Each structure stands twice: as C-alpha cells, then as structure tokens.
Amino acid sequence: MTRQTFGIGGHLPAKAIEARENEFPLFLLAVLAPLMALPFATVEGHGLARYGLPLAVDLLFVQSVRAMPPWQGRISKLPIHGLYKLLALVGAVSVWLPYLQGHQLPNPLRVLFVLCRALFYVMTAVRVIQVLANSHRVNSRLLGLGAAGYVHLGLTAGQLATLMQLIDADSFQLGTMTRGEELVTRLSYFAFVTIGTLGYGDVVPASPVGESFVVLLSISSTLYVSLLIGLLLSRYISFRTRQSMLEGKEFVQK
C-alpha cells in the first residue's frame, strides 16, 4: 500500500472541499451530540437516558460520511471510501446492541464492534486534517470544522481506550464508576481530561501500553492545536494576500 493509494498527506482538490463546506457546521453539531449524551448514557435507563447515546452516535456516523470528501484509491482491491462507509454501517448498527440486549455479547464480538468504530473515528480524524491542510480559504465553516476536529480527537481516543480495556482489563484503573455507567463513557471522560491537560487522577493508566497511549494522546492533542493554528493563519494570510493583489490590479486598471 503506497502513500498515494491510501491518501494520507495526498492532495485534496479545493473543489471537493468547497462542495462539502455546507456540511461542516452540521458535522460540528454531530460531534457535540455524543459528548452531550455520554453523561446520561446507561443501559439500565429509559427513554433518552437509554437511547440518547446510540442516537447521537448514529447521527455522527451519518454526518461524517456526508461531510467528509470521498476517499480515493484502494487497499488491494477494496475501495477506501467503500471501506469507510462499511465501517460506518457496522458502527451505527453495533452501537445499539448493548442498549437492546444488555451486556450479553461475547467479549470478542464487543472487541470487533469497538474496533470498527475506532477505525471509522480514526479515518474521519485523518480526513478532517486533510481538509484543513488542503483548503485554500478560511471561513466560519472551516473554523467550525477545526473545532469539530478537536472534539472528535477526544471521542476517537475514548473509543481506542475502550478497545484497549476490552482487550486487556488491566490497561486502566477506572476508579469509582457510578451505577450503570458505561465503559466508553468512563474512558471518553478520561480522554477529554487528558487532552485538556487536567489530570484529575481518578482514571489512570495501569500498564505500559496504557501509559504509552496517554503519552501519544497528549502529544497528538498538542500537535493538533499547533497545526490547526498554523494552517488557519497561513491560509488566512495567503487568502488576504491574493485578495490584496487582485484589488491592486483592479485599481491600476482603473
């Protein structure tokens, strides 16, 4: 698999980005929806307390596919965009299973479903960075996408931490969990505390793999903010420079 095939760091046409810009504000709202639903999510609840989180996550899956420019290229013979939509479908369906059947799924199946959601989140995070890196202009919609990318980083880290905990129950010490609190809720909270550099100490890594994950997450969040500021500033300066040159040419012609 080559760099060009997977599209990492590859050029994304400005027209492809502009065609999706109207979806960026909705993507920001879709990213915030699971964050708002997480504190109230419980399998033992009723109404929105039970079904609010899967509804919010499904909204995020749908809007991610709508907002992100289509992937180009293939992995072997599998189209990358087809894989992306397949992961979205599996993730959207599987997120309902614990709330419909309780925690009766075999652990290997739970690991598989969380892995699918984590891969989808990672691919979306990569696509957000590609859009920000290849956009030729800065506007309110692109700023919204940048904000959504930061929140999405926390959700992605929460899924990855949940996957690690399902594979190895000693990855993290979870502290005191409230009755009915979901594992993904607890570890998503931990992920946002980590990227916010708060470090309350109620949830901590308990294995070398967990510690390495926290280090990588801390570095990734810092790099994202730094890259976001740099990209937006460079695009804004470039846009203003081109605009000033055009205005200067029009003035000379007059």
Image (cartoon, rainbow, N blue to C red):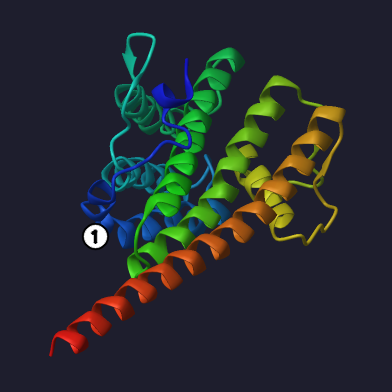
Residue 166 lies left or right of residue 138; in this view the side is right
Indicate the position of residue 100 as horizontal and vertical percent values: 42, 31
Residue holding disc 1: 22
Residue 129: percent from the left, percent from the top? 48, 47
Give the SS element for disc 1: helix
Residue 105 drawn at (x, y percent): 53, 18
In percent of the image, x 73 and y 53: which residue is there? 194
The residue at the point 87 percent across, 34 percent down is 206
Relative to the observer, which residue lies in front, 253 or 212?
253
> Quick one: label 1, few (<14), some, or many (20+) residues within 10 Å?
few
Image location of residue 155, percent across then percent down: 55, 46
Relative vertical location of residue 174 with respect to residue 119 in this rendering, above or below: below
Viewed as shown, does residue 192 lie left or right of 77? right
Which residue of the protein is positioned furthest toward the left in this rendering? 254
The quarter of the picture where residue 158 lies is top right
Q: Left or right: where does residue 245 sit relative to residue 118?
A: left
**Could you say which quadrant of the image residue 88 lies in?**
top left
Q: Residue at x 29, y 45 (%)?
A: 13
